[in-house]
């Protein structure tokens, strides 16, 4: 019975016998298996991997020696990648290259997990970078990851085994991204840390200028760079580092500061020189005058170099006596030599305040010296305002004629209308306030006040000229032609005879005599009357020639008085 069972195997027994006959056993497609070199035929190695049939692999996949000869021998045990158990020809499809790749991926995944570097060599160029052989696995090296700085020629790096850092791995897609730059930066950081630990603040070292920027220069101190800022190159003002240094220059610098967190090193050159601000208060006392050079012009003033490293500011308000609200660039120019006066010194803040206008004579003081109060001057009308006339005088200064000082008899609002811009005008200096920078002038004062003193008195007879006729009387003027006095004779004062009290009987330009009946100096008004003059003349005539009661008529008396007056004239 047992023999019958042995002669009739079950389905499971049949499957096992089939697997054994095919030699598959534990072998699975897509895995790495071990095989033995059974033979070498021409350029192929026959590999027995324990299957029904052997597989063939090109000998070159196993590598060659220095002479280019294959190193593989019959009987060698090798690992290969089993792609298929059997192909159409009945052969096992195996690959040494794929076995190496699988082996490499497994190894690289372990390295990647530990964040360790891996050895490889750059073998070719591709778009955007290079390919790197990592001992069987191909990786991509981006162009930006080749070096710390851009590399123009990668030729010397090709084919040379060197360390790389794995940035990314994707086994299903077969992608590996590596970086040579990360390795260099790490090595540089280690080297920098070691070098920084050897430096101390205040130490003096020699270095070589590697690069120059707008804000300073980078100096190589022997494997580590430090920044020499433009403000630490010299005590004097430096517009651009290239004015002081050039790439390749060997310089002596002092280590000003070391930042332990960022490992940044600040350097200085001026610290090796004596500070020009030491004793600056003694060198530049307040009130002293010095020569300097304009180094910089801003909206608020100009900087003047008194000596190398010492600059003072001339504020815009201290630049000119007369030019107000003007940009400093319209008064001075860069590199111009100027004379300045020290106004203030603050050594702790490294500030010197200078004055440009103080080095020149105050134009108001100069004007007062040349033109004392009471002197007559001439100026050009620059502007007319509600306050008066502004006259342009010498040295770009102005004087003002107030409305009340334009004319003795005419209201200022009317008198100012007689003057035009640009017209030359003579005036008298009334006052000069040097501190407030003001000059007061008067036009009417040139002729003197006609009402001052005893020039005119009440009861005095004056000859007047008719200037205007009105319904209420006539306007007249008299006195000095340069400063005439104006007055108004009322209609009722034109004559004693009512029939003669008619303004129209006069014409503009007529001359007649009138008597001053009142003088109001405060109101600057003189009252005139022809009627009062006739009455006074009649009184004198009666006293001299008798009255009508003595037999003489009024006509006779007045006629005699007039004839006597005419004979005297």
Image: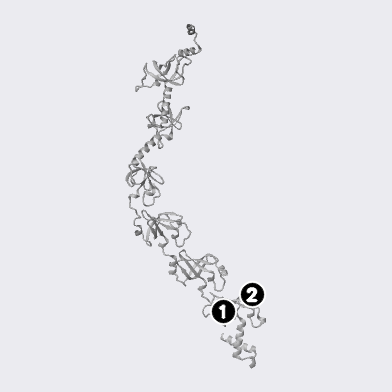
Query: Can see residue 324?
Result: yes
| 303 vs 172: above or below | below
The x and y percentages for residue 335 are 40, 54
| 363 vs 524: above or below | above
Regarding mark 1 in the picture, which secondary structure is present there? strand
Closer-to-camera residue (197/433): 197
Closer-to-camera residue (351/530): 351
| 55 vs 261: above or below | above
| 303 vs 12: above or below | below
The x and y percentages for residue 520 are 56, 78
Query: Can see residue 43?
Result: no
Q: Which residue is mark 1?
A: 519
Density class for disc 1 (Cα within 10 Å; few <14, some 14-19, many ≥20) is some
Regarding mark 2 in the picture, which secondary structure is present there? strand
Residue 470 has which mark?
2
Closer-to-camera residue (513/471): 471
Q: State the quadrant of the C terminus.
A: bottom right
């Amino acid at each position: 019975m047992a023999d019958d069972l042995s002669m009739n195997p079950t389905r499971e027994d049949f499957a096992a016998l089939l697997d054994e006959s095919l030699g598959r056993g534990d072998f699975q497609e897509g895995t790495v298996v071990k095989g033995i070199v059974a033979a070498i035929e021409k350029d192929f190695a026959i590999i027995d991997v324990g299957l029904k049939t052997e597989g063939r692999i090109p000998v070159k996949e196993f590598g060659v020696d220095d002479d280019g000869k294959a190193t593989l021998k019959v009987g060698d045990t090798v690992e290969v990648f089993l792609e298929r158990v059997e192909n159409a020809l009945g052969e096992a499809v195996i690959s040494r290259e794929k076995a190496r790749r699988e082996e490499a991926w497994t190894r690289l995944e372990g390295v990647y997990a530990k964040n360790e570097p891996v050895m490889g060599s750059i073998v070719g160029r591709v778009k955007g970078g290079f390919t790197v052989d990592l001992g069987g696995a191909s990786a991509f090296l981006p162009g930006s990851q080749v070096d710390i700085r851009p590399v123009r020629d990668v030729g010397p790096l090709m084919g040379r085994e060197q360390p790389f850092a794995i940035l990314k791995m994707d086994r299903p897609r077969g992608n590996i991204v590596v970086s040579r730059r990360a390795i260099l930066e790490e090595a540089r950081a280690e080297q920098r840390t070691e070098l920084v630990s050897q430096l101390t603040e205040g130490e003096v070292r020699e270095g070589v200028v590697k690069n120059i920027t707008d804000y300073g220069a980078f100096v190589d101190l022997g494997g580590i760079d430090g920044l020499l800022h433009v403000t630490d190159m010299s005590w004097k003002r430096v517009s651009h580092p290239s004015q002081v240094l050039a790439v390749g220059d060997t310089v002596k610098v002092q280590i000003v500061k070391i930042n332990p967190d960022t490992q940044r090193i600040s350097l200085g050159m001026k610290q090796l020189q004596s500070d020009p601000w030491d004793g600056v208060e003694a060198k530049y006392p307040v009130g002293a005058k010095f020569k300097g050079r304009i180094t910089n012009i801003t909206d608020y003033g100009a900087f003047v170099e008194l000596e190398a490293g010492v600059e003072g500011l001339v504020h815009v308000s201290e630049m000119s006596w007369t030019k107000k609200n003007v940009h400093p660039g319209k008064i001075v120019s860069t590199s111009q030599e100027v004379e300045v006066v020290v106004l203030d010194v603050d050594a702790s803040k490294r500030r010197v305040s200078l004055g440009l206008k103080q080095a020149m004579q105050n134009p108001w003081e100069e004007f007062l010296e040349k033109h004392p109060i009471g002197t007559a001057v001439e100026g050009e009308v620059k502007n007319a305002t509600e306050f008066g006339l502004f006259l342009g005088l010498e040295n770009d200064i102005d004087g003002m004629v107030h409305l009340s000082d334009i004319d003795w008899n005419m209201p200022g609002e009317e008198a100012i209308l007689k003057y035009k811009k640009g017209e030359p005008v003579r005036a008298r200096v009334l006052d000069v306030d040097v501190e407030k920078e003001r000059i007061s002038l008067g036009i009417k004062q040139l002729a003197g006040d006609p009402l001052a003193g005893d020039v005119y008195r009440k009861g005095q007879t004056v000859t007047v000229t008719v200037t205007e006729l009105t319904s209420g009387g006539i306007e007249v003027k008299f006195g000095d032609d340069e400063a005439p006095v104006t007055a108004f004779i009322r209609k009722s004062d034109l004559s004693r005879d009512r029939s003669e009290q008619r303004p129209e009987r006069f014409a503009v330009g007529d001359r007649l005599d009138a008597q001053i009946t009142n003088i109001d100096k405060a109101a600057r008004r003189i009252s005139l009357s022809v009627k009062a003059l006739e009455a006074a003349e009649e009184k004198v005539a009666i006293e001299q020639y008798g009255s009508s009661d003595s037999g003489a008529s009024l006509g006779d008396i007045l006629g005699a008085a007039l004839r006597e007056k005419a004979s005297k004239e």
